[in-house]
Amino acid sequence: GAVVSQHPSRVICKSGTSVKIECRSLDFQATTMFWYRQFPKQSLMLMATSNEGSKATYEQGVEKDKFLINHASLTLSTLTVTSAHPEDSSFYICSAIRAVGPQETQYFGPGTRLLVL
Amino acid sequence: GIQVEQSPPDLILQEGANSTLRCNFSDSVNNLQWFHQNPWGQLINLFYIPSGTKQNGRLSATTVATERYSLLYISSSQTTDSGVYFCAVDLTGGGNKLTFGTGTQLKVEL
């Protein structure tokens, strides 16, 4: 089946630093990827839609200058949390859309746990 | 925006028991999916079920789109079924953008 990976799986950083999270589709090309955030004991919240070759589309309330998204190739999207603060600590999950003919299926990565001290 | 509510929020079962999880949504949807999030956080797609009924082993799901709800049935539960179950909906013409429900935390005990 289709596989989506994320790197790193876990990261701890100091407040004020930037952290980059990678999302890769390993065996298919994805023109569209999504980034979600999940706080403990809560649901997943969509942050942004990452489109290959164009600017990301951010959901209401998500700061585009704080969460930089780059979809540089058909298999890689990156999320950079700039000037991270403790309130940015969360579980970040990406997904990638695989299209087979008219059917599109969304595959999820294993997530990245970010802890900002 | 669309509201997606799940019930119950928490559920504890003895191994071998059956259960029904419910997902209510407030608007018409193009797509509905059920996911299992394991204790390590990985989301596993269980069903793509915008309408009708599907079965896969001990799991089955039914969506009644006209009444805006979906049900996930788990039979003969096992400890490996533990985790969080989410339904997620894609609004009509939403382009695969999923809105996740509030989730049901399931714990299956021996």
Image: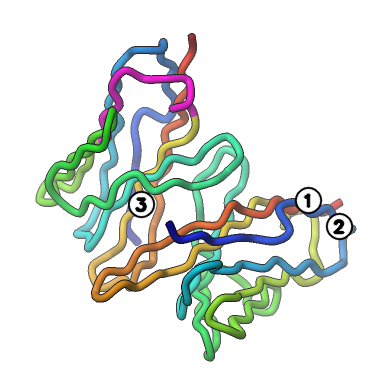
Q: Residue at x 53, y 81 (%)?
A: A74
**Residues shaded magenta:** B72-82
**Which amino acid type is marked by label 1?**
Leu
Quadrant where the N terminus of chain A sits is bottom left
Q: Residue at x 52, y 90 (%)?
A: A54
**Which amino acid type is marked by label 2?**
Cys
Question: Residue B69 is drawn in which quadrant?
Answer: top left
Residue underneath mark 3: B88
Is the residue B6 above or below the residue B44 in the image? Answer: above
| Inter-mark Cα distance, 2 to 1 | 6 Å
Horizontal and vertical percent position of residue B93: 25, 73
Q: Are marks 2 and 3 on the same chain?
A: no
Q: Chain of mark 3?
A: B
N-terminal label among 2 and 1: 2
Q: Nearer the viewer, residue A48 or A95?
A: A95
**Which amino acid type is marked by label 3?**
Ala
Q: Residue at x 30, y 31 (%)?
A: B21
Residue underneath mark 1: A115
| Inter-mark Cα distance, 2 to 3 | 32 Å
Q: Are marks 2 and 1 in contact (CB under 8 Å)?
A: yes
Is the residue A24 above or below the residue B47 in the image? Answer: below
Dot 2: element: strand
Is the residue A31 above or below the residue B66 in the image? Answer: below
Residue underneath mark 2: A13
